């Protein structure tokens, strides 16, 4: 897919205020500091589109970006940031759940995982939650340039094995590096494929 243009549309904490256009939305979520904003900027070829920060937990709103005037990227708050405290984490959880469970336009949720780490309890519980609620999702391993190819393959294989302990089949899985622009075409082609099937009424 060729990304011709991408622009910011709206930020808000209320799913009812999301754009009312009926266009497909592809949401991105993960633990704080997983590289979400960098990935969105890489996919859209737009360095300053999503605000990157070295401070974890910076995204606290639902951010909509329209791509090619025909579909949205949605940047969701990161989950599990300890320094927010219980009240802050609960507020973020409500925002995330309201969007994931109630937003009809949400076509696929991309769950971002740092490829350098073994399966984390918080991620596995979140993925389980998606399965229990029938939420369509795919997994993106980020920061693939930070480890060797062999280590990446071992870590992804271990993660798949862990998921298969409770899942009958695996969701689509992608490996990316925002710095090296790895995985960009694969993720965009996957989105393009879904967009085409929606357009054909499948």
Image: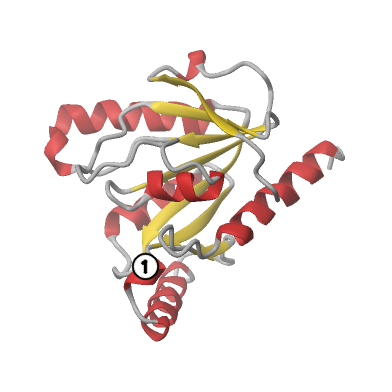
Q: Which quarter shows the C terminus?
A: top right
Q: From the viewer's perspective, is 42 left or right of 186? A: left
Residue in the image at 31% along x and 70% along y: 116
At x 63%, y 29%, the residue is 105
Looking at the image, is 140 positioned above or below residue 30?
below
Residue beneath label 1, please? Answer: 115
Q: Nearer the viewer, residue 160 or 147?
A: 147
Q: Quadrant of residue 14?
A: top left
Q: Nearer the viewer, residue 179 or 137?
A: 179
Circle 1 sits in a helix, a strand or a loop, which is it? loop
Quadrant location of residue 152? bottom left
Residue at 22% x, 43% y is: 56
Please state the horizontal and vertical placement of residue 199, each as a whole percent of the image: 82, 37
Q: As drawn, is 183 to the left or to the right of 120?
A: right
**Residue lying at 12% horizontally and 39% vertically, measured from the top left:** 83
Across and down, in percent, residue 22 comes to 69, 23
Residue 86 located left or right of residue 53? left
Q: Nearer the viewer, residue 74 or 47?
A: 47
Q: Quadrant of residue 87?
A: top left
- Seen in the picture, residue 125 relative to 26 is either above or below; the reply is below
């Amino acid at each position: 897919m060729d990304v011709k243009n991408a622009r910011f549309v709206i930020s808000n904490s209320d799913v009812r205020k999301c754009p009312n256009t009926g266009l497909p939305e592809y949401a991105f979520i993960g633990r704080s500091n997983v590289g979400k904003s960098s990935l969105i900027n890489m996919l859209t070829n737009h360095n300053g589109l999503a605000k990157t920060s070295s401070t974890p937990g910076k995204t606290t709103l639902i951010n909509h970006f329209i791509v090619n005037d025909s579909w949205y990227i949605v940047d969701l708050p990161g989950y599990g940031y300890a320094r927010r405290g219980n009240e802050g984490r609960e507020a973020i959880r409500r925002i995330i759940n309201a969007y994931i469970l109630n937003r009809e336009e949400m076509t696929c949720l991309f769950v971002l995982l740092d490829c350098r780490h073994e399966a984390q309890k918080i991620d596995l519980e979140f993925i389980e939650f998606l399965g229990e609620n029938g939420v369509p999702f795919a997994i993106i391993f980020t920061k693939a340039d930070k480890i060797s190819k062999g280590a990446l393959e071992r870590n992804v294989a271990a993660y798949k094995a862990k998921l298969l302990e409770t899942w009958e089949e695996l969701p689509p899985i992608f490996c990316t590096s925002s710095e090296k622009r790895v995985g960009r075409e694969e993720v965009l082609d996957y989105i393009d494929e879904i967009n085409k099937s929606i357009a054909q009424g499948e």
